[in-house]
Each structure stands twice: as C-alpha cells, then as structure tokens.
Amino acid sequence: MSMKGEIIWRIGLIYVLMTLIAGAIIFKTLHVQIWEGEKWRKKSVAVRIKDFEVAPNRGDICACDGRKLASSVPYYELRWDASVVDGDLFGEKVDSLALCLSRFFGDESKAAYKKRLEMARARKKTYYLLNRRKVSFNELKKIRTFPIFRKGRNRGGLIEEMNSVRLQPHVNLATRTIGYLNEAEDRSFEGRVGLEGAFENELKGIPGRSIKQMMSGTWVPVTVEEPIDGNDIITTIDIDYQDIVQHALMRQLEKFDADRGTAILMEVETGDVKAIANLKRQSSGGYEEEFNYAIGDAGEPGSVMKAATMIAMLEDGYVEPEDTVDLGGKGVYAFFDKTLADSDGKKPGKITVQHVFEISSNGIAKLVNDFYKDKPERFVNRLCGLDLDKKLGIPLKGEGDPYIKHPGDSTWSGISLPWMSIGYEVKLTPLQVLAFYNAIANNGQRMRPRFVKEIRHRGQLVEQFEPEEVGGRICSRSTLKKLQRILEGVVENGTARNIYTDKYRIAGKTGTARIATGKKGYQIRKYRASFVGYFPADHPLYSCIVVIDEPSLSKGYYASSVSSPVFREIADKIYSAAYLQYGEVKGEADKSLPVCKNGLKEDFLAVFDDLDIEVEGKADVKQNDWVLTASNEGENVVLKPRRITNSQVPNVKGMGLKDALYLLENAGLSVGVSGAGMVMSQSLQPGTEVRQGSYIHIELR
C-alpha cells in the first residue's frame, strides 16, 4: 500500500471510531434524558434539598413554687470555615483572633492558637473545631465580637452548632428523684430514671421539620414546621425543705461514718412528697445521690413494723394498751430452736402492753406467738389488710416489691410468725413504711405518695393531679386513737426519749434491724437504723422517715442515737417554718355532740366510730336493728332500742326521711311527705294495726 493509501486508511479508521464514539455519547445522552430522566431528576433534588428535624425545647421540672429543678440550657459548639475568609483579612487579624481565643478558653497560648488557625487556613478546612468546650449563649455573644468572626458567617466563617444541656440548678438536691439525661440516653427513653423518665412523653415535646436547600455551599431554610416545646412539670418538692432534709441526713452520715441513708418528708393530708434524699458514700469519702433507696430498696424494716403488729392485736381484741403482761425476768424469748433477746439487756417483768411497745421490747413477738400460733394466717391477713403487701403505685419507675410471707410459702417456719411481728422475714421500702405511718397520722386514711401536682405549657394548666386516697381506713377509729397515743409514748417515755421536746409533740417509732449479707446471712454485724413518725402529734402536718444503713459499730448503731436525732433536726426546722407560715398549729377540736336522728344502728355505730364519740347502751340494743339516740349530759351518746314490726304502724319520729320511708313503705303504707329535716309528726299513731295501702302523712322539720 502506498503512503497516500495508508494515510487515507488511517484517517478513515479514526473517522469511524470518532463517529462511533459520538453516536454512543448521543445515545447515552438521550437515554439519560428520556429513559432515566426521572430517576436523575429525583437524585438532583435529593442532593440539593434536605429534610432536617428541628428539636423542641425539653420542658422544665419545677419545685412546688415554680423554681426550676431541671432545665435545658442551650450550649454551642464552635467550628470554623477557613475557606470563606479573605486572605488579606486573615493575614491582618489572625494574631488578634489567636490572642482572643487564648484568653477566652485559657487552655493554650496565643502562638498555639495562631498555628492551629494557619493550619486550618492552609488546608482549606470548612468545618474546623475551634475548641472542645461548649459555650453558653452569653459567651457566644462575646465570641461573635472577636476579630474575623465579627464579619459574620459568610465572611468570618464562624459556625455555631446549638445543643441543649440538661442542668439541675440546685446541685445534688433530690437528684435521683428528679432524674437525669446523659449523652447515651439522649436518643432513648430507656434507662432514664426519676421524673425525667416517668414524664418523658410530657417533657420531650414534638419535633419540628425544616426543609433546606443547598445554595452556594450553604444549607438555606426553604420551609419550616415549628417544633412544639415540651410541657413543664410542677412537682410537690419544696426546695427549702429539701435542703433541710438532705443536709441533716448528710451530717449524720458523716458523723457515724455510715454507708448510705435516705430521708423522706411527706405532707400528711395530701401525701405530697416535700423532700426526698438518698445519699451513698463515695470512694472519695463524700456522699452523693447514686440510687433511689427510698423507692427501690425493699428490705427488712425491723421494729418500725411493730405498729402494724399492734394494730392486728388491738383490732382482734387480744390486748389493750393498759393491759399488764408478764414477759418474765430475763428479757429472752424462746421460739422453737431460736431465741430473741431485748437489746437493752433489761428484765422487763410485768409491764403494760403500751410500755412493751414504747421500749421496743421483743416481748411483742411472744404476745403474737401466744395469740396467733394456731392461726398464723389471721395475723398475715391483718398485715395484708393494711396493704403492706401492695406497691404504692407511684409514677416513678423502680419501686421495690413489698413482701409479706404467708403460711403456705416454702420458706415458712416455726419462727416466721414471731420474726414477722418485729419486722423480719418481710420486706418494705422506706417510702412504703412512711406511707403506712402517714395513714396513722391522717386519721387512718392512706394517701398515694404524690410527686407531681401539675403539668403546664408556657404557664397554662394542661393537667392537674389531685391528692389520691387509696382504699378505706386502715383500722377502726378506736384502735387508731390507741395507737397514736402509744406512738407518742415512744417519744415521751420510750426509745426515742432523747428527741422529746416541750415545744410540740412528736409521735413515732424507732427500729434497729440486723442486715442480712448474702449467703452469710446475719453473721456479719451490719445494721439499719430507722425512725419514722409525724409531727405535731396532736395536729399532724408532716410525716417523716429517716433510714441509715451500716453506721460504724464503734460510733453507735441504735436508731435512738443514729436516726432519731436527724428526724428531730428536720422536725424542728420544718415546724418552725410551718409556724411562721400558718401560725399556731395546735388547737382543741369541737367536742360538742352532733345532732342525731333516730335510725339504723349500724349507721350510727359507723359514724360515731369515725367521729371518735363514745357510745353507751350497746348491750341494750344488741338484738335491735333500729335505735333511738340520746345524750348523757352532753358527754356520750346513749343508744336505746326501738321495736319495729310490720304488723304495727312504726314510730318514725326523729328519723330522717330515707329511714322513715323505708320502714313505712315496708309496712305496706302509702306515704305523703312535707317539710325537710327529721320527722316531727306522723298522721297514724305508732303501734296501731297496719291496714295495707293506708295513707300516712309525715311532717319533717
């Protein structure tokens, strides 16, 4: 082939190849534009437009007076886009900026900051972290005035990324009850404790939505759906009372070198938890809140259980406070192969039942064993009737399970009954014990412990939580009055005599319990010292429990010296504050007898028991359902029999309308009524023969 032919062939080959390549390009272009066009257009939008979640502000947790217990505070992470800063500006101001950053953060020299800024500039960093420390909004405002940064985001390059940090302004006050958030838990409700966890749905708010478009390297908001901030939680906690309770507990823990302790203050009438402290010794030697022992630590309560035991014996009629019992001259009580001894080493001999309780003698176990050994289920049922086997049903997670042993349990033994009577082989949390004693102070009515009063959104009421009664009265009025007097006697004459004051009256019970330690049981000497009670005893405002675990044996471990003084310190300060707020809290109740209508005996007995009014003549009306009432010189109510038969017109004078109608209509009479009040007259004479369908008119005044 000639030179010319070879050149033409090569040119032709190149032309063909170029034509094929051009055709492929045209084909691919058409394919992308037509067949794959929709796909790539969607990807283009996805790259240029992005959907961002806008986090709401978390609601505050507040004390009962509105002061903040936990709040989310905005903090900012500072980064820098070095690529947007003009070269002349950077060269002129980098020294000044480095000096300002060095002085502000105080962690590196001016030269070190200058070197870092120059390195970021040279590498054209667009998201350079200036410092690991986050800054507050007020600090951010100052940083915005620094050289270069004052030129704004697009020329100065300062990037501000906001994050919310959950803070508790009153450091270490009720920390575990309030709850907390940390970085590992921020994205998950699981693991959060206290009120933060219990009211997560109310506090967290509803996230908003921001659609942003990439323009000139920056995400610019296009449309925004505003977030809805979380609600605020108004708790029952009083910050001033919390401070009193917590510091009184801490001082005693330090004094006795104890392992841990808890103290709770509750308002008697409402069940409001006004203060709750849980302190644990740290390796550093100090005490901090680590676990909510008040709510979660179910253990053997010891002698504070004796109040429930006394209710059982009083309700069953086995004892009266003034009864004399012979406990022997040794203070040691045998039960099968075990013995119990009174801790004080004294020989009780013959003493009253009340004094057995006041000095916390374990002779109470002997009484229980004597009365209930052939029917232990009766005693256990009494304890369960006090709801001691049930959780309190509080909103906070982690409430410990109460445990009352039953005769059918596999671990029941010959010593279970006497041991349970003094607070062993049963388990209760400190809050469960306090709720029981609070019922004693509250005329027998149990209240569910209340931690939150209201939920609010920007000051507007969303939901209100009223005080909640739980079940009926724990025992009869007469038993309650006897027990209240016995509890006062503990402070006046018994184991808590050291906290007696003539300024106001205190009622309560000490308890010193041996703590079981794993498989070794009670071989290792560890103790739990408790005092629970209420004040002022004659007009209870507050109940309180103090539990201190594992005080140093060399410094003392009895409740009278370890826990009772903490209760007294708390009571003194709270009573003084209450006196200033409410004035004199003591007062005599109106003892005049109420006006009584005649009527059904069972109704009268229930009402008089509730009003603590003595009733005479019970034996005279034993066989009667309907009674007359009279007073004995204004001191007591006297019941007299009223004979009712359906064959004679009943005497309904002095009755209320409901009872009168019941008797007259049951007798087959047609009744007409005028007036209101009690029956003063009836048209048919009592005792006359009833004619079915006869009309009788009664007048009430």
Image: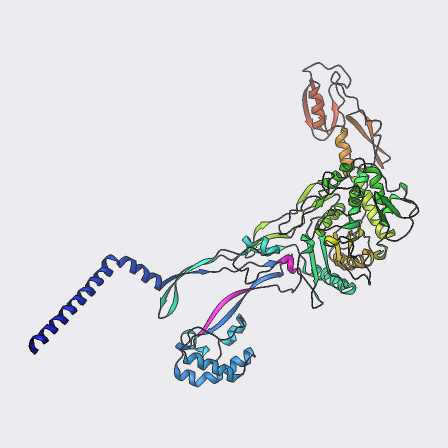
Q: What color scheme is it?
A: rainbow
Q: Give residue 459's quadrant in the image.
A: bottom right
Q: Nearer the viewer, residue 514 or 9?
A: 9
Q: Residue furthest front?
A: 1
Q: Position of residue 553 (x, y in %)?
A: 81, 61
Of 296 and 552, nearer the camera is 552
Q: Is residue 627 above or below residue 455?
A: above
Rendered-image quadrant of the C terminus: top right
User: Camera-side residue: 693 or 578?
Assistant: 578
| In magenta stretch: residue 353 | no
Q: In which quadrant is the N terminus drawn?
A: bottom left
From the viewer's perspective, tell me whether residue 499 is left or right of residue 445. right
Residue sitting at 91 percent across and 51 percent down?
346
Do we see residue 592 in this rendering?
A: no
Report x, y in % for residue 352.
89, 44
**Image height of 382 relative to 454, above or below:** above
Task: Pinpoint residue 475: horizontal percent, then vertical percent.
Answer: 76, 40
Q: Horizontally, is 568 left or right of 216 in the view? A: right
Across and down, in percent, residue 315 comes to 80, 38
Q: Which residues are magenta?
A: 158-187
In this image, 525 relative to 107: left or right? right
Position of 33 with respect to 624 (left or right) is left
Magenta segment includes 170: yes
